[in-house]
Image: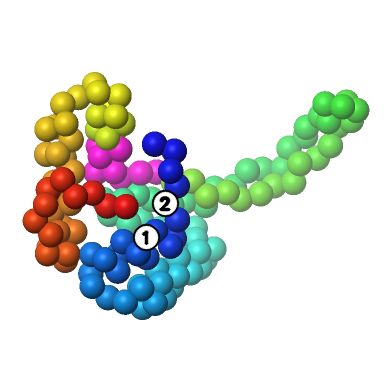
């Protein structure tokens, strides 16, 4: 754990799985992120089935105290993005974390990940069930 997947990693992996060149995939991924940002700014919600829901939530203006000077200040209202993972993501993440902690058998993890991994295999032509993304 601890390794961060970057946009570059995503582009490389999608290019590998699909066989398309990395520049085309990079353009598609960037366009997707741009559309998501515009959608959040305009509508405030994005729902991607089996992945999750992005929502823009508002935090109202509030009073706070500067701990050094004890001065009361006004913290302005702001918006932030909240992400609620989909059910499949919750299952996959929880099973992987448990497998890392050796609380579940690796066979159980394979059965869950093979369902979603099978979709990627259709595009990549890979038949190795042990192959993992990234």
Q: Nearer the viewer, residue 71 or 94?
A: 94
Q: Is residue 22 magenta?
A: no
Disc 1 from disc 2: Cα separation: 7 Å
Residue 39 visible in the snapshot: no
The picture places residue 112, in percent across and down from the top left corner, at 16, 40
* Magenta range: 84-93
The picture places residue 75, in percent across and down from the top left corner, at 76, 41
Q: Is residue 113 above or below residue 121?
A: above
Q: Residue at 82%, 26% (x, y): give it.
A: 67
Quarter of the N terminus within the rendering: top left
Neighbourhood count class around disc 1 (C-alpha, 10 Å): few under 14, some 14–19, many 20 upward: some
Residue positioned most to the top? 103
The picture places residue 14, in percent across and down from the top left corner, at 30, 65
Q: Residue at 39%, 43% (x, y): give it.
A: 84
Q: Which secondary structure type mostly characterizes the magenta part of the structure?
A: helix
Secondary structure beneath dot 2 equals: loop
Q: Is residue 87 magenta?
A: yes
Query: Image check: 104 left or right of 46?
Result: left
The picture places residue 121, in percent across and down from the top left corner, at 14, 59
Q: Is residue 15 above or below residue 100?
A: below
Secondary structure beneath dot 1 equals: helix
Query: Image check: 99 left or right of 57?
Result: left
Q: Nearer the viewer, residue 10 or 71?
A: 10
Quadrant in the rendering for residue 45: bottom left
Residue positioned most to the left? 127
Q: Which residue is mark 1?
A: 10
Q: Which residue is mark 2?
A: 5
How many marks are shown on the rendered structure? 2
């Amino acid at each position: 754990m601890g390794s961060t997947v970057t946009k570059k990693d995503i582009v490389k992996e999608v290019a590998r799985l699909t066989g398309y060149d990395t520049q085309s995939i990079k353009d598609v991924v960037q366009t997707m992120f741009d559309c998501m940002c515009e959608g959040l700014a305009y509508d405030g919600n994005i729902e991607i089935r089996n992945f999750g829901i992005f929502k823009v939530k508002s935090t109202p203006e509030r009073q706070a105290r500067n701990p050094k000077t004890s001065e009361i200040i006004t913290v302005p209202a702001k918006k932030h993005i909240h992400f609620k993972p989909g059910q499949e993501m919750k299952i996959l993440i929880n099973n992987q974390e448990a497998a890392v902690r050796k609380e579940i058998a690796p066979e159980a993890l394979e059965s869950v990940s093979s369902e979603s991994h099978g979709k990627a295999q259709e595009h990549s032509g890979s038949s190795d069930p042990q192959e993992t993304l990234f």
